[in-house]
Image: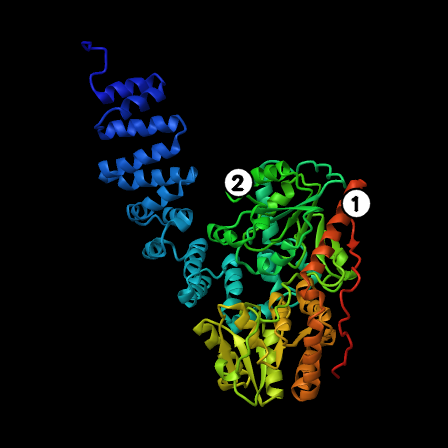
Amino acid sequence: MTATAAEPTSPFERAAWLYQTGDYAAVVLYLSEQEEKDARSLALLANAQLKLGNKEAAADVFVTLADAITDRRGFFLKSAATLYRECRSQAKLAAIAEAAILANPGDSKSAFDLLHAAGRGLATEEVEPLLGHLDPMNPEHVYFVANFYRHRKQDAERGYAVLVAGVEACPGNVFLKIQRFAAAGPVLDFPSLRAFDDLMREPRSDLAQRIFAEQLALQRLYWCDDERANAGPSLNWRLLTARKRAEGRGPRPRRTIGPASKPLRIGYLSNDFGNEVVMSVFRPVLERHDRTAFDIKFLCYSDPEARKFQQTWPDSLRSAIIPIADLSDEQAAEAIAAAEIDILVDLKGYTKGDRLNIMTLTDAPVTATYLGYPCSAYGADIDYLISDPIVTPDTSKPHYTEQLCRLPEVQMPNPPLDPGAGPSMRRSYWGLPEGKFVFASFNAHYKITPRVFDLWAHILDAVPDSVFWIAVREGFVRKNLLAEFARLGIGADRIIFTDKVLRFADHIGRLSLADLALDTLPYNGHSTTADMLRGGLPVITVKGRCYHSRVSWSLLNACGLGELAADTDEDYCRIAVKLADDPARLAEIKARLKRSRATSPLFDPDRMARHLESAYQLMAHRARLGLPPDHIDVPALPPTGVPDHSTFPVS
């Protein structure tokens, strides 16, 4: 066919003519067939793809244009990056991130957006050289850089230094102040921790009130033992409210619960279905659920590494997994409805990685929260919190938006005792001196507060022939701890550091080498205290005023050692010093612990499974009667043995 003067005479003109007619699909088809395209044709192709809503395809063309028109390279790469972010093309975004940042020097906002969005798609060694393109006066940028280094264990000190510098550069920024105080615990920056304690004392200033309101809910628990305050609004609540608003819809009407003639379908919601602490203590109970009366499902949004670990699970657990990691909150709620879950149990609360918005969207007839977060999940609209009478006595009821469903003996599940666990060891293997009294703390060191540190120093001073065995890994954190002990008159020669061990049996085996464990306050050891008792090591704690500060008391009580939960800080010190000075009394307590462990409900996952199942049946019974959730006290099963609960007050 011979071209006329009115017809397009080049590929670009032909494509431009089609574009002007609005036939964008024809433009894409025509230009895609051309082996060579000039810059004008590429620009036309990119715009046609955008008109069709093909953002990723348009971004691909912009990347090609960046190489074709070098003087506009920065513009085209930034455009491509924006589109890749919008369509969540993580791999392609990561592939151009470095080039886009380098092509737009001085644009710290774009650099931040790119690094933040590319996330895990970039290797650590790729990110670090690009951090210099961020703005050291922008609090968000400072926080990003600090987190980058803090998440690399060997650079945690550097990350904290970035935060400190950021606070100095932006003295009026409350967000950075909060982050600096939050980071002070993990590095044991005691001057900052003490300054924070002074700031947060009642009555609180306007700044203190702002900081309290902007803290993550879990971070509050590490220092605050005020049940009313901890149960109120937090940063997590505001984030959850924003997610609810973004979802664009309210909760679904609740479905009718299944009939009593069918197995009750329980759905556990979490991302901890892997080699996690929660799963390590809860798995024995999950394996013992009565499958004739309960149909168990795991609504799992764990990361790929955790999902690999699931391959080691027995078929009964592995077959119960419903993956929801790639689903939106709304889609996850639909999956829960499709699975006909009767009782949806959140295992996260306000902890890292929670998806509590699913709990607000679900149509499950009954909802509950358990195990992961020792406080009220304020704002998540959950029906029940599963606990026990010690961690949540009647006085706790006004401070929970959930109704309390209290298990009769202890709220924490645990594996059964293993008679073969804990190989015999000598003190010398762990660098412990013979003939010295050994106090120990294996709790996470970010739970160490100035309050408990002062008590520890007082105890060590009162028992001069003693040492303190403590689990702290990082060198600069150890340095900070030693400096604070030195300030309080305790020499470095009395502090013996240890690290985690790979084998759980080795950890349990070494615990009996110590004489007495000292709990952290106000946030107790939870699984750590259970480990101590499993290893035969008594623990001194204080009866706190909140769930998280009463857990050790609950665990001690379940092992017949309730008298080791002191009423006051002064009693905490007095009991510790008294037992250090009375070897016979301490030996009697250890012997009693050894006897009581065998029948303790703490190490009886079968009994825990039955109590938990009773809790679910009682929740379901109310729902079938059309009654709203109300406080429930689960009745105890008949005792399986006769534990020795005789007590000998330490006075």
Residue 101, visible in the rendered structure: yes
Numbered label attached to residue 606 = none
Mark 2 or mark 1, earlier in chain: 2
Per the image, label 1 sits on a secondary structure element best described as helix
Q: Position of residue 622 (x, y in %)?
A: 79, 45
The span from disc 2 to disc 1 (Cα, nearest Å) is 31 Å
Q: Nearer the viewer, residue 256 or 572?
A: 256
User: Would residue 77 be found to the left or right of residue 207 on screen?
Assistant: left
Q: Nearer the viewer, residue 245 or 313?
A: 313
Neighbor class of circle 2 (other Cα within 10 Å; few <14, some 14-19, many 20+) is: few
Among all residues in the image, which is located at the extreme left? 2
Q: Quadrant of the N terminus?
A: top left
Q: Amino acid at mark 2?
A: Leu
Above-or-below relation of 3 to 424? above
Numbered label attached to residue 622 = 1
Q: Position of residue 42 (x, y in %)?
A: 27, 29
Q: Residue at x 57, y 80 (%)?
A: 513
Name the residue tied to disc 2: 327
Q: Quadrant of residue 391?
A: bottom right
Give the number of callouts.
2
Q: Residue at x 33, y 45 (%)?
A: 95
Per the image, label 2 sits on a secondary structure element best described as loop
Q: Position of residue 284 (x, y in %)?
A: 62, 58
Q: Position of residue 33 (x, y in %)?
A: 26, 24
Q: Amino acid at mark 1?
A: Arg
